[in-house]
Image: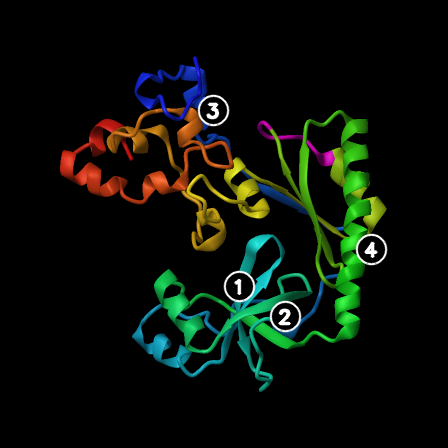
Amino acid sequence: MSYDFNDFSEWIPSDEELRELEDRDFEFYTQEVEAPSVGEYEGPCDSCTNCAAGSHPVGGEFENRETSLDIVEVEFRFNRNGFFVNESGISFMTGSYVIVESQFGLDMGKVISVGEEVKQKRRSRGIIGQPMRKILRTANVEDINEALSNRYAEDDAASTFRNLCKKLLLEMKLIAVEYQFDRSRITFYYTADGRVDFRNLIHDLSHIFRTRIEMRQLGARDEAKMNGGIGICGREICCITWINQLKRVTSNHARIQGVTLNPRRLGGLCGKVKCCMSFEVQNYADEHQYDEEYQL
């Protein structure tokens, strides 16, 4: 059967082709192991977030308090971002690189929004009241050089990871490696067809790198979000530009909207049903009362 996009009406996908479009059911997880020689980072209040700015119940009272805070949104590698309180009195400009507190030490990122724009984002995402850490200072030349040094070290770490996987016969596909700015942690992002027993792998990695090791398993959608790209619509994929939390999307979303089940047409860059299939599906479900039949 041809995959010609001009012949949607005659396309009859097999069950196997439809299953390839569905999100996998197994649980993704992370595991961290700390090398014995590495001590805990001790920041303000021992790096605890319990008393961090923003760790209060959501409500009008705290929203009024939050309006008086100088909050900065910082973007990190692999399309991660976060909000940080600026108590330094420094006026940070968008595009500048900064040093911030993180859970295990220090990290470096780029400022992407400041001022009222940040507060509007927090309102729209419903995260007013969630904990925030502090932004410390603007990154200097030494910090930039240190970050570049980390990038070179990540290439060596990736090679070491692949060699160990081959030695231990582990079916894992490495997606990316990320050193935290102060090298207090190294994260390996990977994909695999189910859970993997990588205890021996972590043991070897911790002795080689002598730092905290984090293994983070990704799904197909997460991998696409990290790598980015252009969708079939000709625009940058939604999970890069505006979707904050990836949701499960299935072929039922297409059925409800009367979209032909052509795997080549329904699949996004990740190989799963495109996220945009969920944008209007609830309107169709409400109109035709499909909720019980398709269990959205």
Task: Tell me the distance, in whole angstroms, between the alpha carbons under discs 2 and 1.
Answer: 10 Å
Q: Would you say the residues marked 1 and 4 are in contact, meaning their CB atoms lie under 8 Å apart?
A: no
Looking at the image, the residue that sits furthest to the right is 208
The amino acid on which the numbered mark 1 sits, given as a three-letter code, is: Gly
**Badge 2 element:** strand
Q: Which residue is mark 3?
A: 20
Task: Tell me the distance, in whole angstroms, between the alpha carbons under discs 1 and 4.
Answer: 29 Å
User: What is the tally of numbered marks visible in this picture?
Assistant: 4
Task: Tell me the distance, in whole angstroms, between the alpha carbons under discs 3 and 2.
Answer: 41 Å
Using the rendered image of the protein, determine whether residue 57 is visible from the camera's viewpoint: no
The amino acid on which the numbered mark 2 sits, given as a three-letter code, is: Val
State which tag comes first along the sequence, 3 or 2.
3
Q: Would you say the residues marked 4 and 2 are in contact, meaning their CB atoms lie under 8 Å apart?
A: no
Q: Would you say the residues marked 3 and 2 are in contact, meaning their CB atoms lie under 8 Å apart?
A: no
**Helix, strand or loop: magenta stretch:** loop
- Give the extent of the magenta segment: 193-199
Q: Would you say the residues marked 2 and 1 are in contact, meaning their CB atoms lie under 8 Å apart?
A: yes
Out of 254 and 229, give the one closest to the viewer.
229
State which tag comes first along the sequence, 1 or 3.
3
Q: Which residue is mark 1?
A: 82
Q: Is residue 99 left or right of residue 293?
A: right
Out of 83 and 225, give the one closest to the viewer.
225
Residue 108 on image: x %, y % = 67, 66
Q: Is residue 89 left or right of residue 5?
A: right
Kindly report which numbered mark, 1 or 4, lies closer to the viewer in this rendering.
1
Query: Which disc number belongs to residue 37?
Result: 4
The amino acid on which the numbered mark 3 sits, given as a three-letter code, is: Glu
Q: Residues within 10 Å of mark 2 (few under 14, many from 20)?
A: many
